[in-house]
Amino acid sequence: MSILFYQMGGFFGYSIGDVLRTWADMGIFAYGLPFLMIFALVYGILDKTQILGQNKGVNSVIGLAFGLLALQFDYVSGFYASIFPYAGMGLAVLLIAMILMGLTSQGQPVNRAWLGIGIVIGIIVLISSVSDMFWLGGTAAGLVSAMPALLAIGIIIGLMAWVMNSGGDGGPPSR
């Protein structure tokens, strides 16, 4: 039976590689999965924080709009195409480290070690994906041309941190 399976070229003449290439040609990886991830994250955050109330319809419309607007240009698709392969390699390294630490820890807690390993792997993944630069135009020149946008993002994040950390205790205003 297995010889017949391989002679046919996979399942009904298709291999996993053929299916994945077809999905890539259809845009599943470039648009479908990034949209689902963005939608799920935005919807989940809005639903969990209940910042706009408990109306699931409003949360889904905002998640849908956010997901579609994020994919209007190819920046998100390029960024995801660049970072997730490196993140997969980082997870493989983390899994190997977990196995090796499990062999040597003999039941003692190693939480701080995991935090350190995770931070190091996270930094390596980010540096590797930024050095790829596919999502910023394909070369290091993309980083230079993206500098105003990166500066604006940094300023916005800084202002958000300043606003969130300043002020009172977040309770209702006193009269």
Image (spheres, grey):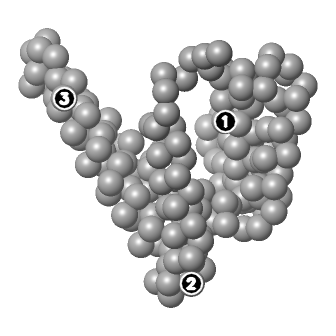
The residue at 50%/61% (across/down) is 154
**Disc 2 marks which residue?**
145
Mark 1, Cα crowd under 10 Å, few <14 / some 14-19 / many 20+, is some
Q: Secondary structure at mark 3?
A: helix
Q: Indicate the position of residue 157 as horizontal and vertical percent values.
A: 52, 53
Label pair 1/3, CB-CB below 8 angstroms: no
- Residue 112's label in the rendered image is 3
Q: Indicate the position of residue 91 as horizontal and vertical percent values.
A: 39, 42
The residue at 11%/14% (across/down) is 108
Cα–Cα gap, marks 1 and 3: 28 Å
**Disc 1 marks which residue?**
41
152 vs 111: above or below: below
Of the numbered discs 1 and 3, the one sitting upstream in the chain is 1
Q: How many marks?
A: 3
Q: Is residue 100 visible?
A: no
Q: Amino acid at mark 3?
A: Arg
Instruction: Give the camera-side residue of 152 and 114.
Output: 152
Q: Secondary structure at mark 1?
A: helix
Q: Amino acid at mark 2?
A: Ser
The residue at 37%/64% (across/down) is 127
